[in-house]
Image (cartoon, rainbow, N blue to C red):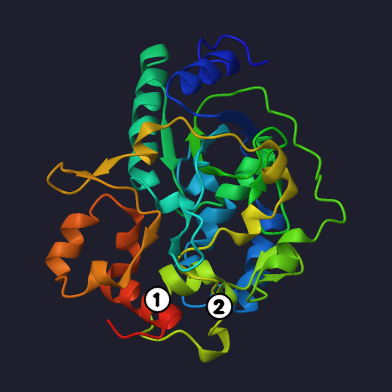
Amino acid sequence: MPTGNKLDNETVIRLASELGFTLTGFALYQKLGKETSLLMEWLGKGYHAGMEYMAKNTDKREDPALILPSVKSVISLALNYKPAVGFPPDEDKLKVSSYAWGEDYHYIMWDKLSLLVEKFRETEPDTEAVYYVDTGPVMDKVWAVKAGLGWMGKHSNIINREIGSWFFIANIFINKEFTPSPEVEDFCGTCTACIDACPTEAIVPGRMIDSGRCISYLTIENKSDIIPDEFRGKFENWVFGCDICQDVCPWNIRFSVPATEPRFEQFTDSEGNPMPKNVTLTSAQFEGISEREFRKKFDRSPLKRAKLKGIKRNIQFVTGQKI
């Protein structure tokens, strides 16, 4: 245990828990040489599809000291988002990935992280810290594994034995020393449930995802006006994201627990008006809607990521009906 620090493991865990974080782990700063090689292999195979930003800043992904020169540790945090209630029992509903039912998780986690780092500085004023929620040039999942939050499943999501894989990840790079958390053994074993269930065969060997075949990529990050015809009839009514690989995971089936963060249940538009959860969508919601109306209505929702034309494209691809 590092000595002389008021900001120790126990204090960080307590502060993070008070702010609603579900899991907290610690890793020592190190360069990610092996992991960067795997990233380059993934990029070399073209598995990043149209996400060109993934090929940028590989030096920073390998070495966080290029982001925070004084970094000594990484604090990895998880926030559970598992919905208490699933989809309505109607197979014709156009489905939205459960992470996008409420307010955009980036806003929720950024608010929590800002408060958490502020509390760190109240405890030790010389604290230097930089944090990210899957938007910076860092390998979020790698650090989550190194900090003991869980292991990387075959679907490339991090799995925790106590709560499954329904959680978001944040990482804080900090100039303080902590006792590192033990890494967790891989408990996927011979299970291939996620691989077998993927309707587009996006889960490939090496715990990698071929993004160009992934429903989540094709309905969100895909900026093309079209979705390849080879996937027609394979989306199983998903029009924004996909939860199939997590739904079938035995660790989720047995151990996942409902989230307690209220902002996943209720959010507002840009003017503060309460909005219903986006569990499912309909074609009628987007008929005649303007870009301005769309941005207002979905300002705090992850659905804005796909933009109006993307949502329309997805619905048309699944239903075969032009909006």
Residue, far right: 190
Between 209 and 322, the residue placed more toward the observer is 322
Q: Do the numbered discs 2 and 1 sit on residues whose CB atoms are within 8 Å?
A: no
Residue depicted at x 68% and y 28%: 180
Which of the 4 quarters of the picture holds residue 130? top left
Helix, strand or loop status at disc 1: helix
Q: How many marks?
A: 2
Residue depicted at x 51% and y 54%: 60
Residue 174 visible from this viewpoint = yes
Is tag 2's residue or tag 1's residue first in the polypeptide sequence?
Answer: 2
Residue depicted at x 54% and y 55%: 61
What is the C-alpha distance between the residues marked 2 and 1? 15 Å
Which x, y percent locates residue 199?
64, 73
Residue, far front: 90
When the figure is inspected, residue 155 is found, relative to residue 251, above or below; the finding is below
Amino acid type at image mark 2 = Gly
**Left or right side of 12 for 199:** right
Position of the N terminus by quadrant: top right
Which x, y percent locates residue 293?
14, 63
Which x, y percent locates residue 122?
36, 14
Amino acid type at image mark 1 = Asn
Q: Residue 212: which numbered mark, if any?
A: 2
Badge 1 is on which residue? 314
Residue depicted at x 30% and y 72%: 283
When the figure is inspected, residue 293 is found, relative to residue 276, above or below; the finding is below
Residue, far bottom: 229
